[in-house]
Image (tube, rainbow, N blue to C red):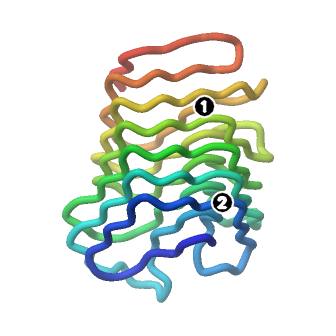
């Protein structure tokens, strides 16, 4: 992975995360940026801020039972605040789900980001894949030109508002309330 973030308060800003790769067996599966527990127990992290980054051209080659996240993978954890904002996530790839971003667990705030041209091998859930509760997704642009699948997928609870989601057939969805 380009950056694998762990314990403590984290402020990760104004970085270029380009052309990295991760393979099955890596401690983190997000090829560009990963946040997750490396030793099996969830850390308690007070605050995480990932802002104003350019995460592009990364590739995650995973096994059939692994999680995805070509650009970003956020897996497990307990935190008071997780702010993912003002980032550009583009041209990433995974052999699993969530070419742009894969999120497992909840209480995330994802806002003011641009996702485009992220891909996966499975043909579905290529831009963003959410699993968990109490996630907030607002003021984002998710632009996909791939012919198959969804640009956005979630399982659990998600509050999404004021987003622009563009699917390959030109279907535009604005101000989605999920």
Q: Earlier in the sequence, mark 1 or mark 2?
A: 2
How many other residues sit within 10 Å of disc 1, few (<14), some (14-19) or many (≥20)?
A: many
- Looking at the rendered image, the disc whose residue lies closer to the viewer, 1 or 2, is 2
88 over 14 or under it: above or below: above
Q: Quadrant of residue 118?
A: top right
Mark 1 and mark 2 in contact? Answer it, CB < 8 Å: no
Identity of the residue furthest to the bottom in this view? 39
How many other residues sit within 10 Å of disc 2, few (<14), some (14-19) or many (≥20)?
A: many
Q: Secondary structure at mark 2?
A: strand
| Quadrant including the N terminus | bottom right
Residue 106 position in % (x across, y down):
34, 55
25 over 109 or under it: above or below: below
Count of numbered labels shown in the rendering: 2
Q: On the image, numbered disc 1 is attached to which residue?
A: 151
143 over 101 or under it: above or below: above
Tell me if 117 is positioned left or right of 46 in this view: right
Q: Could you tell me which residue is drawn at 62 percent across and 68 percent down? A: 29
Residue 178 position in % (x across, y down):
36, 26
Q: Nearer the viewer, residue 151 or 178?
A: 151
Q: Secondary structure at mark 1?
A: loop
Tell me if 100 is positioned left or right of 5 in this view: right
Q: On the image, numbered disc 2 is attached to which residue?
A: 18
Q: Quadrant of residue 136?
A: top left
- C-alpha separation, residue under disc 1 versus residue under disc 2: 22 Å
Residue 127 position in % (x across, y down):
61, 39
Residue 45 position in % (x across, y down):
26, 75
Q: Could you tell me which residue is drawn at 39 percent across and 84 percent down? A: 41
Tell me if 60 is positioned left or right of 89 in this view: right
């Amino acid at each position: 992975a380009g950056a694998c973030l762990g314990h403590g308060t984290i402020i990760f800003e104004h970085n270029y995360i380009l052309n990295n790769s991760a393979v099955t067996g890596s401690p983190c599966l997000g090829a560009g940026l990963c946040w997750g527990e490396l030793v099996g127990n969830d850390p308690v992290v007070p605050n995480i801020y990932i802002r104003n980054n350019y995460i592009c051209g990364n590739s995650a080659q995973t096994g059939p039972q692994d999680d995805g996240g070509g650009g970003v993978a956020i897996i497990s954890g307990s935190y008071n605040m997780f702010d993912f904002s003002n980032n550009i996530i583009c041209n990433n790839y995974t052999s699993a789900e969530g070419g742009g971003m894969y999120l497992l667990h909840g209480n995330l705030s994802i806002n003011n980001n641009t996702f485009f041209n992220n891909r996966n091998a499975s043909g579905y859930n290529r831009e963003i894949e959410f699993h968990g509760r109490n996630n907030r997704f607002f003021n984002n642009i998710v632009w996909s030109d791939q012919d198959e699948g969804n640009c956005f997928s979630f399982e659990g609870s998600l509050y999404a508002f004021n987003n622009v989601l563009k699917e390959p057939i030109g279907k535009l969805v604005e101000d989605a309330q999920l």
